[in-house]
Amino acid sequence: MNYWALLLLFLHGGEFPPEHRLGSILDGVSPDVLLIQEGNLNQALSHQPLWELYPLVKISLPWSISAEYVQKRDDAVLFEAQARGLAVGGERRPARLLQEGFLIMGQLDSQEEKRIVQWLFFPRLEGYADGIITPAEWRVSFQGRPGPVFESIDLLTFGGGTAGYIARRGGVNWFVVVSERVFGPYNQARHLVISPGGEHFAFLAEKGGRWRIQLDGKPWGEEFEDISWPVFSSDARRLAAAVRKDACWHLLADEKIFGSYDRMEEPVFSPRGEKIACLATRAGDNYLLVDGREVFRAEEIRFPVWSPDGKRLAFAARRGGCFRLVADGRESDCFDQVDVPVFSPDSLRLAARVRKGVEWRLWLDGKLPADFQLCSEPLFSPDSKHFAVCVLSGTRQRVLLDGQVGPEFDWVGRLRFSDSSDLLGYGAQAGGESWWKVMPVPRGVK
């Protein structure tokens, strides 16, 4: 089987290719992402090893951007991509431009990818003529249809088969374009989001120093001093944001205001949209709010994560210098640090990385079952019956699968279970060679 066939199998969700050595065509030459022109695997700008092709973010709507001048740069990074979602850091990641659609694979672990709700793209292009910045004419084309001319394009976003962007013209006039409809001008515009199914979109518009959410291009709610990113529920029936009014932050959900705090983070809906959680700070204490009610208080609260069925909420909390994993009203033992909680797909099991001293250990269902230092987030199989994680063996790395330890390598890549949960695949490097490794999942082990 040739390497492009293996790549096609992986990209289109088939079962794992057989174990094999990775040849030069898939050897990593790019430190950030792989971009392949849609529908044509022979036109790739750069390659990452096979194990870095997951998670996969596909922008299925063909698009392109053109300008009067091209920015002169020493590197090829033309865009920065930012992931938005629960317990996702939000840092921008390099991306490369293709003229008609692209695939982007960011360096995220598989659990982090599941929490991403939207990808945003920030152009880093400016018009240049003989080394001097000049006004440039910018156009964004979707599905072969060119849009209007602007002086700059500030943000592109995609969702549910719909695309939109924020642009400027005339120096001070801001516009929002969604599905070829132009809204504006505004004094400022920012934070364009599209609901998961593409049914609705929202953005912020400023007038006279005050901000207001625009839902499908129409004013929604009242004006505020500041507003966070708007957030849609998965069914697009609900909309929420953190808002600042009279120098205090509040939760705005379904046009109702809750609480009053010194600071508030972006709210997050449960997977089915029935509940909404957010973190807030008042007088030095952190609060976890669920549907506007304070349900937990601590010196610090991090990483609130909903279970897939939306019935459980887990998070890390610090009191008196001690971090604990909190879920279902129960708190774990004391640790120096607790990482992002990970639920199994059936919502019944819970795992996390925890640190005592300098060593990261596995916390699984209330216990510390393995005396290993971890080098990855824990991963549950799709059927929730199996569990895998990368562990350290001295200076080398191994895979721990249902308590059984695999061979040692210099480096172990991202872990991935097959859809049928009977295989575990991962990339590995040893002795200067790169391999795609496959481990059978032990039968009868849970």
Image (cartoon, helix red, strand yellow):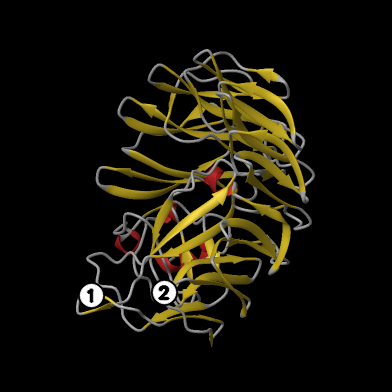
Instruction: Report the Cα–Cα distance between label 1 and label 2.
Output: 25 Å
Residue drawn 65% across the image and 38% down it: 278
Three-letter amino acid code at the position of disc 1: Ile
User: Left or right: where does residue 30 sit relative to residue 3?
Assistant: left
Q: Name the disc covering residue 142, or none.
A: none
Q: Name the residue under label 2.
A: 98
Residue drawn 54% across the image and 13% down it: 334
Residue toward you, 72 or 167: 167
Three-letter amino acid code at the position of disc 2: Leu
Give percent across and percent down for residue 381.
62, 41
Residue found at the very far front of the displayed protein: 208
Q: Mark 1 points at which residue?
A: 132
Q: Does 424 appear above or below 6? A: above
- Is residue 155 visible to the viewer in this orientation of the structure? yes
* Dot 1 crowding, Cα within 10 Å, few <14, some 14–19, many 20+: few
Residue drawn 49% across the image and 15% down it: 321
User: Left or right: where does residue 153 sit relative to residue 305?
Assistant: left
Marks 1 & 2, CB-CB < 8 Å contact: no
Q: Does 240 appear above or below 392? A: below
Give percent across and percent down for residue 96.
38, 66
Q: Does 293 appear above or below 368? A: below
Residue drawn 49% across the image and 43% down it: 89
